[in-house]
Amino acid sequence: MALSFQHLTSTKQLTREDMDAILKVSLEMEKVRDSGSSELLKGKVLASLFYEPSTRTRMSFEAAMHRLGGSVITAEGIQFSSMYKGETIEDTIQMASQYVDIIVMRHPEQGSADKAAQVSGVPFINAGDGPGQHPTQGILDMVTISKERGTLDGISITMVGDLLYGRTVHSLSFLLGLYKDVTFTFVAPDALQMPEKVTSYLDEKGMKYSVTQELEDGLNSDVLYMTRIQKERFADSSQYEKLKDSYILEAAHVKDRDITVMHPLPRVNEISTDVDALPNAAYFRQANNGVIARMALLAMLLGEA
Ligand code: NCD
């Protein structure tokens, strides 16, 4: 199925048709994965460039490529790459385009993905550009909500934690804005509330959202999306220390409610481990969906699905 874009830097690029098609292919990919190996991307090579820490995103992209019969070459950490010698993002990507069929990159600088996409000779995927966007996380979150709740239209979602620097909630909000009658509750300390780039988009779309500092105000939604306070984005570490334990979800908050708990992970303190055993806890299933969603994206961007 064709997508309306060649490079994926932001979820703002997607149409509803794109998102629906990715959902459909992700569910097909789930069957492919569960039935063993596939040769769909045999002979194709992925460059996996991670200049900022990652566990899930990187491992699930690489697992996705391997599951489809493709191969992976990697570069990690600016200190081990030519970027350390002063090579620009643009030059690194033009080089990588000579070697591979598709590129995934995570980089600490907001806007780095746009720079890369402008010069990439092969499909380019943003795996997180600083506090900017994390489009593939947003996509796997949509797959998760659809599987857990059976629909995307009409859902209510509460986003909690670091909504200012958390790129996952930005990417997810733009995608939910493509669906009908989605309502949002944003729970954050004033200093970490959802930025204007997201709220103005929701205003344009006529979406309803409310803003609060109290976790209790957000427990009546269908989905509770917890996030980590993004320590690495704070210029002033005392400000981080003050805010780091703003919200801690415990089993008692959700055990008698029909609410799906999600988290992009890694968690630090914000979800107590006593939540893990509850049927509400969807965050490990969510991580699992990362592989099928990325299998779908790789295959679609390479014109093979
Ligand atoms: C997120 C990220 O990197 O933005 N992690 C992930 O990709 N699953 C969330 C985070 O680091 O808090």
Image (spheres, helix red, strand yellow):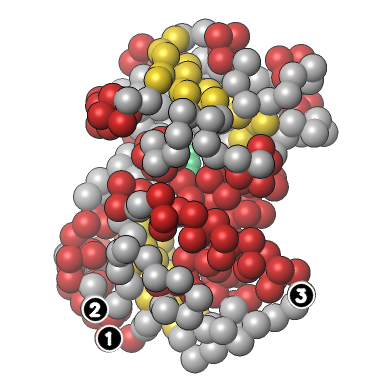
Q: Amino acid at mark 3?
A: Ser
Q: CA distance from mark 1 to mark 2?
A: 8 Å
Q: Quadrant of the N terminus?
A: bottom left
Task: Confirm or deny contact between disc 1 and disc 2 (CB under 8 A).
Answer: yes
Q: Nearer the viewer, residue 235 or 34?
A: 34
Residue 146 left/right relative to 134: right
The residue that mark 3 highlights is: 35
Amino acid beneath label 2:
Gly
* Percent of width and height locating residue 209: 41, 19
Q: Is residue 115 left or right of residue 203?
A: left
In this picture, residue 18 sits left or right of residue 285? left
**Residue 252 visible, this orientation:** yes
Residue 56 seen by the camera: no
- Residue that label 1 marks: 98
| Residue at far bottom of view | 43
Earlier sequence position, callout 1 versus callout 3: 3
Residues tagged 1 and 3 counted as in contact (Cβ below 8 A)? no
Q: Which mark is residue 121?
A: 2
Q: Quadrant of residue 18?
A: bottom left
Residue 305 image position (x, y, % from top left): 50, 75
